[in-house]
Image (cartoon, rainbow, N blue to C red):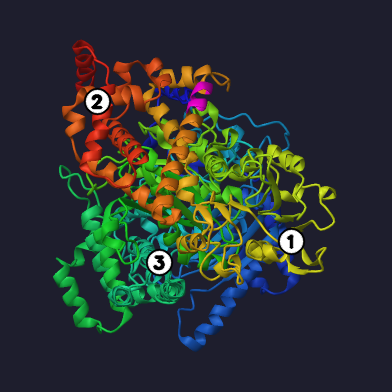
């Protein structure tokens, strides 16, 4: 979809009359026209004959049992028309056998013999099943077969869309559930299904997307109702939940829930459990599937649940039923986000409300990641030891101790057990949370819902003193339970805003205050902001170091539970380190550093599963970035507008266009700049196509060759990250003639040739974006080989046996010297963080000479080598340029992509920058060249300063890179805090913005006057400060003193042309307007 096509749908709907939902639900009998099964009597006689011939039911009871089944259970004729007499006889046999069994057991237990128990499922085909189960609505356990319905049909990706109908019998709490395969009119068509329009939906013209049989028995009002719900589903992500009274049957209430299939799991059982929690017995439960197109993920599911007030238990008064249904309407949304939580037992025992259970579930995840496992003792130990950066052995001991303390204490299950044990304290803290974050319009009376009544009975903690006193009174001070509960309280205090109480949401998001939850002991530089998101299939985080910051969103998948546990233990540290590295990399641009990580549940590795997690992560964060008029308000304790600038990273590159368009649909004013890495038809500048990241890396390699006079020297090169990736492919394509590849690793395996890998073949793979598994091995020398990750027990040319290809690939970067005598240049272009760490550093140091085995390393991949190892390698003679310096081309490109979207109005952006029909405009092409030029210029400027300081001071470049980044960022922050230049030297300010910082290409399109109005003031300020900070440090070095800075500013002032006063006033007047 293009950036302008969404307007058409909106304009069409403005003239379409929206039907009144309260007038569309007539009654359960009218909404679904009675299906007249003319063969019912003959079928009934055939069933009696089968039962009579079997001899199991006494002859004088057969008629009674058949009558009860046909006439007393509320089953409609459509069911009987679809089933065979033999199957119906089998069902009646099962029910009768259960009655006998229950009667016999009652003689031993003195139970009520009128009730019977049954739990039986009959799978008659791949997409047809019958479930029979009894239950006590007042008991603790909900209907168990509902979970089977989810697993076998609704959540099963191999299952065709289904329809379901369930009936309850009041006298026995018997629930009969029938599941059928939905049949659509275009099921056998090979052509793409025509999408239904919004106007057709609102008119109830839904036959083409409905089950063929149901299309015949839906009433016209019901079709309009379902069409309205489907249209609402397409407006926003998440479930649409509505309650209405039947027009003709005043005793009947109907709850409707509509959502996209596969966007949640176990939702059918969760909704039924919710009814059980509130002791409400539905009379009928219909589930309908609607095939929107040929893409299964767009199919819509609608639950239609009827309840009769007079059929409820005696202790549930009519008024309580109304309140319970209102509460169900709200909590159905919460359970959509997390249908299965870790506190189901406490929930089933009704010690937790559904809201409290979800709150505890989310809180347990927070505690697991943010509990201070190290504590003050660890800090005291560090201060006593005072380890130095070159003491690698001591640092390794401390690192291992820290890892052990953090990984082996306070497991997730331990935290859950403690919260269950002290569920009353959790409930009280939930009330503290709800009182602060449940938004209530003070002009309206607070509804006395069941949740409100429950909360009214709870006394929250009045303050921290009361909370501490309560803990000290009931919990020993030497138990870990104490720290867990204190961290729960800290969770409450850190929440600045949340979508928890917004009815329509797809995941639960929180904006947290990192100052309260990220101790300096573990995180020396406190981030500016932190988002925490929990969904049905994932948990996610977003850390940024400045108000205006940008960074990519990466997805981490785990094939097994063990891998997930390992990833979960490191996800916060990895997120923090990546954002911190981004902060150092972003020193040349206005945005600070940020990074987002989405960790999927174990076993979820398919692209559709990762997309659902990504889309829910994005949508839930947008919930608390904007004030959406289509959603409820939320309490905003931050009370400040926030804008995030996101980008692609591992696993998300293919989702960027969707997120951009989605932000536009949500009404985000900054939708154009929300994500970088978009496709060209949305104004994006693809890093891979134009080699943006690699240009920066190659600038360092080429400057190093030039400085050390290596341009004519043969360089034997090793690279991780293959020709299928952005950085890896362009590193190959931009490699110089003097570089000879000896080995490349990627996700498919290891490619090696000591005589040099054929470059033409590598170029082919890089152009086609193929993994090294596609390399033509006939072009390898006799000593060359390719080992696939799937290989088992193979022999290499030198006689080495490879037992496991995956293990061989994972460790080859440390074992390469078993195969090659020397490597000159190592360029990591991919791989996991800390792949080279203190535990394997020795593989890269020659024992005889105590020198590094690889003399030159340019770190393209983020965090590939641990910082202590970088410094150690340099001390052993390696010329090393780290990621924060070398890998910053991509962030520069992304920042300038953001600038283009901010600087141009929508019309200029769409028509002059983006252009029609995916044809790149002259402006776009010229802008790409400008971006590439700035990347090259910034990289060379930093290289020159790093090399100069290193040669004069002897300080490792890896250390200098951090110092230089910190110096620029510190100066940037100081300039941002000062209004002097911004307010009092307008001529210099506007000159710098218009002649030095903002590309002339954009100014020529927007005009000098207008471009300063288009770009937000906060962004202009940081553009100015970041330019001054980086330009000064690259020219004068890391020694920032007032004299040098005044000299720098004086030089700039002397460059300023004499703006005429009229021109200057015109710009200022525009800014004021």
Q: Which residue is mark 3?
A: 389
**Label 2 packing within 10 angstroms: few (<14), some (14-19), many (20+):** some
Which image quarter holds the C terminus?
top left
Which image quarter holds the N terminus?
top right
Answer whether residue 926 is magenta in the image.
Answer: yes
- The residues colored magenta run 925-930
Q: Quadrant of residue 152?
A: bottom right
How many numbered circles does the render carry? 3
Choose between 253 and 931: the one closer to the eye.
931
Q: Quadrant of residue 131?
A: bottom right
What whole-number distance in Å separates the C-alpha atoms at marks 1 and 2?
64 Å
In the image, residue 730 sits, relative to residue 320, either above or below, namely: above
Residue 474 location, x and y as percent? 22, 82
Q: Which residue is mark 2?
A: 1053
Residue 301 location, x and y as percent? 53, 45
Q: Main secondary structure of the magenta part?
A: helix
Choose between 343 and 974: the one closer to the eye.
974
Q: Which residue is mark 1?
A: 790
Answer whether residue 749 is magenta in the image.
Answer: no
Task: Nearest to the eye among marks 1 and 2: give it.
Answer: 2
**Label 1 packing within 10 angstroms: few (<14), some (14-19), many (20+):** few
């Amino acid at each position: 979809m293009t950036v302008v096509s969404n307007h058409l749908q909106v304009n069409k709907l403005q003239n379409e009359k929206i039907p009144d939902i309260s007038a569309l639900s007539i009654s359960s009998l009218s909404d679904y026209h009675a299906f007249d099964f003319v063969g019912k009597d003959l079928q009934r006689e055939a069933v009696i004959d089968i039962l009579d011939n079997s001899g199991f039911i006494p002859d004088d009871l057969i008629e009674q049992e058949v009558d009860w089944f046909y006439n007393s259970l509320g089953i409609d004729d459509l069911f009987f028309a679809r089933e065979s007499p033999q199957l119906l006889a089998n069902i009646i046999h099962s029910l009768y056998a259960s009655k006998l069994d229950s009667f016999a057991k009652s003689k031993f237990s003195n139970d009520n013999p009128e009730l019977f128990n049954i739990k039986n499922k009959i799978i008659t085909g791949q997409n047809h099943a019958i479930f029979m189960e009894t239950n006590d609505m007042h008991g603790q356990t909900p209907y168990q077969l509902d979970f089977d319905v989810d697993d076998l049909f609704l959540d099963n990706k191999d299952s065709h869309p289904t329809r379901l109908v369930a009936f309850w019998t009041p006298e026995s709490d018997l629930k009969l559930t029938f599941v059928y395969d939905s049949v659509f009119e275009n099921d056998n068509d090979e052509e793409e299904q025509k999408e239904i329009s919004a106007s057709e939906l609102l008119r109830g013209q839904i036959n083409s997307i409905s089950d063929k049989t149901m299309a015949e028995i839906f009433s016209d009002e019901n079709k309009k109702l379902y069409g309205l719900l489907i249209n609402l589903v397409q407006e926003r992500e998440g479930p649409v939940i509505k309650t209405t009274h039947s027009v003709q049957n005043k005793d009947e209430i109907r709850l409707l829930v509509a959502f996209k299939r596969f966007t949640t799991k176990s939702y059918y059982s969760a909704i039924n459990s919710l009814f059980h929690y509130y002791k409400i017995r539905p009379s009928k439960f219909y589930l309908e599937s609607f095939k929107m197109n040929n893409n299964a993920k767009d199919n819509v599911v609608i639950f239609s649940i009827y309840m009769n007030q007079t059929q409820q238990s005696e202790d549930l008064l009519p008024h309580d039923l109304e309140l319970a249904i209102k509460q169900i309407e709200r909590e159905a949304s919460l359970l959509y986000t997390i249908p299965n939580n870790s506190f189901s037992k406490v929930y089933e025992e009704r010690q937790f409300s559904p809201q409290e259970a979800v709150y505890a579930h989310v809180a347990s995840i927070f505690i697991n990641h943010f509990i201070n496992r190290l504590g003050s003792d660890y800090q005291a130990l560090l201060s006593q030891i005072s380890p130095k950066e070159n003491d690698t052995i001591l640092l390794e001991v401390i690192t291992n101790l820290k890892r052990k303390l953090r990984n082996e204490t306070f497991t997730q299950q331990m935290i859950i057990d403690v919260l269950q044990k002290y569920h009353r304290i959790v409930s009280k803290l939930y009330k503290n949370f709800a009182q602060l974050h449940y938004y209530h319009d003070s002009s309206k009376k607070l509804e006395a819902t069941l949740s409100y009544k429950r909360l009214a009975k709870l006394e929250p903690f009045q303050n921290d003193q009361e909370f501490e006193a309560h803990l000290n009174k009931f919990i020993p001070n030497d138990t870990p339970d104490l720290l867990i509960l204190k961290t729960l309280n800290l969770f409450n205090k850190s929440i600045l805003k949340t979508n928890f109480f917004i009815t329509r949401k797809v995941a639960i998001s929180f904006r947290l205050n990192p100052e309260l939850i990220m101790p300096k002991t573990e995180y020396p530089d406190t981030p500016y902001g932190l988002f925490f998101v929990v969904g049905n299939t994932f948990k996610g985080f977003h850390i940024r170091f400045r108000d205006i910051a940008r960074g990519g969103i990466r997805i981490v998948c785990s094939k097994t539970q063990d891998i997930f546990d390992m990833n979960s233990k490191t996800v916060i540290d990895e997120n923090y380190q990546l954002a911190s590295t981004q902060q150092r990399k972003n020193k040349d641009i206005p945005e600070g550093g940020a990074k987002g990580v989405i960790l999927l549940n174990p076993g979820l590795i398919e692209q559709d599963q990762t997309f659902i997690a990504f889309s829910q992560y994005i949508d839930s964060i947008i919930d608390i970035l904007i004030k959406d008029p289509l959603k409820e308000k939320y309490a905003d304790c931050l009370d400040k507008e926030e804008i995030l600038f996101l980008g692609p990273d591992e696993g998300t590159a293919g989702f960027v266009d969707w997120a951009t368009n989605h932000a536009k649909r949500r009404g985000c004013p900054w939708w154009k700049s929300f994500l970088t890495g978009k496709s060209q038809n949305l104004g994006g500048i693809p890093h891979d196509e134009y080699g943006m990241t690699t240009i920066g890396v190659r600038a360092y390699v080429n400057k190093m060759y030039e400085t050390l006079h290596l341009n004519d020297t043969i360089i034997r090169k090793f690279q991780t990250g293959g020709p299928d990736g952005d950085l890896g492919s362009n590193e190959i394509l931009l490699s110089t003639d003097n570089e000879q590849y000896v080995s490349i690793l990627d996700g498919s395996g290891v490619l090696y040739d000591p005589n040099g890998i054929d470059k033409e073949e590598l170029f082919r793979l890089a152009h086609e974006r193929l993994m090294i598994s596609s390399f033509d091995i006939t072009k390898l020398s006799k000593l060359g080989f390719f080992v696939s990750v799937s290989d088992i027990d193979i022999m290499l040319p030198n006689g080495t046996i490879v037992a496991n290809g995956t293990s061989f690939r994972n460790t080859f970067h440390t074992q390469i010297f078993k195969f090659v005598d020397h490597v000159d240049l190592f360029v990591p272009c991919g791989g996991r963080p800390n792949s080279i760490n203190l535990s394997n550093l020795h593989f890269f140091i020659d024992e005889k000479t105590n020198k590094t085995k690889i003399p030159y390393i340019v770190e393209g991949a983020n965090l590939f080598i641990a910082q202590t190892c970088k410094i150690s390698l340099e001390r052993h003679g390696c010329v090393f340029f780290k990621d924060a310096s070398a890998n910053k081309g991509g962030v520069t490109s992304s920042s300038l992509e953001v600038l283009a979207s901010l600087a141009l109005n929508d019309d200029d952006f769409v028509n002059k920058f983006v252009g029609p029909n995916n044809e790149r405009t002259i402006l776009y092409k010229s802008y790409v060249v400008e971006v590439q030029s700035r990347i090259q210029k910034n990289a060379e400027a930093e290289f020159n300063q790093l090399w100069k300081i290193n040669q004069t001071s002897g300080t490792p470049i890896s250390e200098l890179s951090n110092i230089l980044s910190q110096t620029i960022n510190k100066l940037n922050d100081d300039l941002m805090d000062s209004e002097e230049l911004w307010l009092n030297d307008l001529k210099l300010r506007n000159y710098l913005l218009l002649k030095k910082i903002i590309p002339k290409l954009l100014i020529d399109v927007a005009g000098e006057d207008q471009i300063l109005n288009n770009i937000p003031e906060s962004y202009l300020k940081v553009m100015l400060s970041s330019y001054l900070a980086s330009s000064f440090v690259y020219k004068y070095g890391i020694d920032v003193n007032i004299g040098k800075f005044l000299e720098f500013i004086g030089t700039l002032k002397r460059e300023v042309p004499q703006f005429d006063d009229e021109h200057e006033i015109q710009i200022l007047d525009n800014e004021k307007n």
